[in-house]
Amino acid sequence: MELESDSGTLSLGQKFSLIFTSPSRVFTELERNHSWLAALLVISLVSLAATLPLLSKIKAYGIIKMQQMPDNPALSSPEALDMAANAAIIGGIAGALLTPLLFALIVALLLKLFNALAGDKVPYRKLFSVSVYAYLPLLLSSLIGLALGLTTPAENFGSISISLYLLFPPDTYTFPALLAAQINPFILWSLYLAALGGAILMKSEVKKVGSYIFLLWLIYALASSYFGAASISNLYG
């Protein structure tokens, strides 16, 4: 990584560190130089690296949970259970690689919608670059999850959480529990960074952009928790 040049341009490493200590400086830099590909690649690879050591435990926990499900002919044989668990592993790998991209795409789209409603025309690619760097607190949470996962037996994997879900017994899937699982300080941190970066690029107030982003997040958290609890209740009767 290069050191900061005379022009004030920040290197990738400097952006990664400053996003935690001086995010406004990073977003101001992105207004001038909105490159994001290298950052997204690094974030995705680190996310994958934080998942790979846990794959065997993910598979074992998946088998345990499927064995606890009501009788399902499709999972009646060890081979079927193994195939389903392998599918969960593939999903975990895909999720680790694609979640940073999907987060950036969706958050940038929401920022662009706010921008359009305000009558301004900040390019989507600039808002996308903001959203890529805003994901870094969530990447930090993945690394914390790795540390917790490595020290947790597979049968207790469901108890791993850095959200308010810690207030509930493991494997609790009621509406309040699922809503608590959405209240993760690292998610809120990333959303704040997205609102801050969006406000800087749009020359808007952080309060306005933040209220918009957090209202949409609250609607999503309530809806996903409600329908998640309802579907699990129907599954287990």
Image (cartoon, helix red, strand yellow):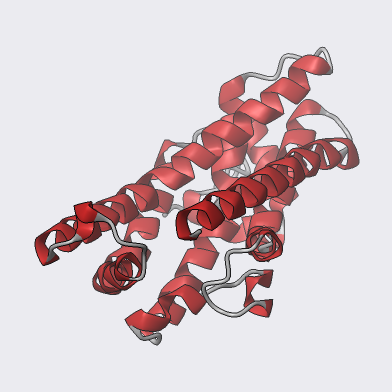
Is 216 left or right of 70, judged from the image as shown?
Answer: right
Above or below residue 152? Residue 17 is above
Residue 208: % across, % down: 88, 36
The foreground one among 4 and 63 is 63
Is 152 left or right of 161, judged from the image as shown?
Answer: left
Above or below residue 154? Residue 139 is above
Quarter holding residue 164 = bottom right
Instruction: Name the residue at 60% across, 22% down.
Output: 124
The foreground one among 209 and 28 is 209
The foreground one among 88 and 26 is 88
Instruction: Name the residue at 58% across, 71% down.
Output: 172
Residue 132: % across, % down: 54, 42
The image quadrant where one finds the N terminus is: bottom left
Q: Residue furthest left?
A: 79
The foreground one among 136 and 200 is 136
Q: Is residue 218 visible?
A: yes
Residue 33: % across, % down: 57, 32
Instruction: Name the residue at 29% across, 69% down.
Output: 67
Quarter holding residue 72 = bottom left
Above or below residue 79? Residue 12 is above
